[in-house]
Image (tube, helix red, strand yellow):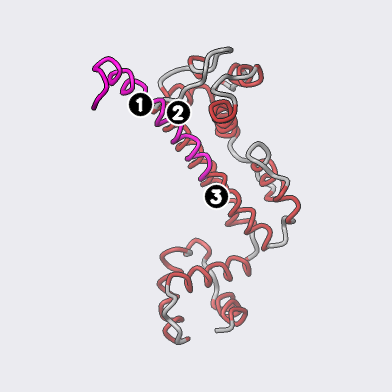
């Protein structure tokens, strides 16, 4: 409130850029955490090793998932993810200044990925990625980051549904149930509540009575 009108106006005009500089990395970080959760399930199922997880980073984690799950993620979304990720890296690690590789990646977007980018952000990514010009984010890039990570996450979730073993999913469902109802200690109460819980959150698995019973035995119910 003690600023001059001109200085206050200048700060307000940059508010969207500052918000984007915080929000876009946050959105990408949440997605990276989700991918690590997926890796934990693959590790539990014996499809991934701790060393492979440790060696994965934001640039390689989706490729590792595709290899282990034998399923390709949407190419256009992956192109968009890696471009916004590299923009994030420029903002965080290079004072916003893009390197030649980022500029080249901007010009190499496929037609489909570019069209979706422009639709979500309202402009060509080259408008924000120029050599010697600091990268900035607007609300458009935040919307894009949220949309892209949501689509990739949904695809990964569906892929895990089909690639993890039935026993692993049954065990996970029971653990999830116990975490939601920690005060239910009587076995019969748990079994009654479990029916509704599985119907609400794990119906797509369509677990059989034998699968549920085996999972209960493994859990020590």
Q: Which residue is mark 1?
A: 15
Q: Are marks 2 and 3 in contact (CB under 8 Å)?
A: no
Q: Is residue 40 above or below residue 121?
A: below
Residue sticking out furthest to the front: 2
User: Residue 72: x and y, percent?
Assistant: 65, 41
User: Residue 192: x and y, percent?
Assistant: 42, 81
Residue at the image position 52 percent from the left and 18 percent from the top: 134
Q: Which residue is mark 2?
A: 141
Sequence-wise, which precedes: disc 1 or disc 3?
Answer: 1
Q: Is residue 133 above or below residue 73?
A: above
* Label 3: how many Cα within 10 Å (few below 14, some 14–19, many 20+): some
Residue 5: image quadrant is top left
Q: Judge by depth and name the residue closer to the eye, 76 or 60.
A: 60
For the residues marked 1 and 3, what is the alpha-carbon distance in whole angstroms? 29 Å
Mark closer to the observer (1, 2): 1
Mark closer to the observer (1, 3): 1
The part of the chain drawn in magenta is 1-30
Label 3's element? helix
Q: Is residue 213 above or below residue 201?
A: below
């Amino acid at each position: 409130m003690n600023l001059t009108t001109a200085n206050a106006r200048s700060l307000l005009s940059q508010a969207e850029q500052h918000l984007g500089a915080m929000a876009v990395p946050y959105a990408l970080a949440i997605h990276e955490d989700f991918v690590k959760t997926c890796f934990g399930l693959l590790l539990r199922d014996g499809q991934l090793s701790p060393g492979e997880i440790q060696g994965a980073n934001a640039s390689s984690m989706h490729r590792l998932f595709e290899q282990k799950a034998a399923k390709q993620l949407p190419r256009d979304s992956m192109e968009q993810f890696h471009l916004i990720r590299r923009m994030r890296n420029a903002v965080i690690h290079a004072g916003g200044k893009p390197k030649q590789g980022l500029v080249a990646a901007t010009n190499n977007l496929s037609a489909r990925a570019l069209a979706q980018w422009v639709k979500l952000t309202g402009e060509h990514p080259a408008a924000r990625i120029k050599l010697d010009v600091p990268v900035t984010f607007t609300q458009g890039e935040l919307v894009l980051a949220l949309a892209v990570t949501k689509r990739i996450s949904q695809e990964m979730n569906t892929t895990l549904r089909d690639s993890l073993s039935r026993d692993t999913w049954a065990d996970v469902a029971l653990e999830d149930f116990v975490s939601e109802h920690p005060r239910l200690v009587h076995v019969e109460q748990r079994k009654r509540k479990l029916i509704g819980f599985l119907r609400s959150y794990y119906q797509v698995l369509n677990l059989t009575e034998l699968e549920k019973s085996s999972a209960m035995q493994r859990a020590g119910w």
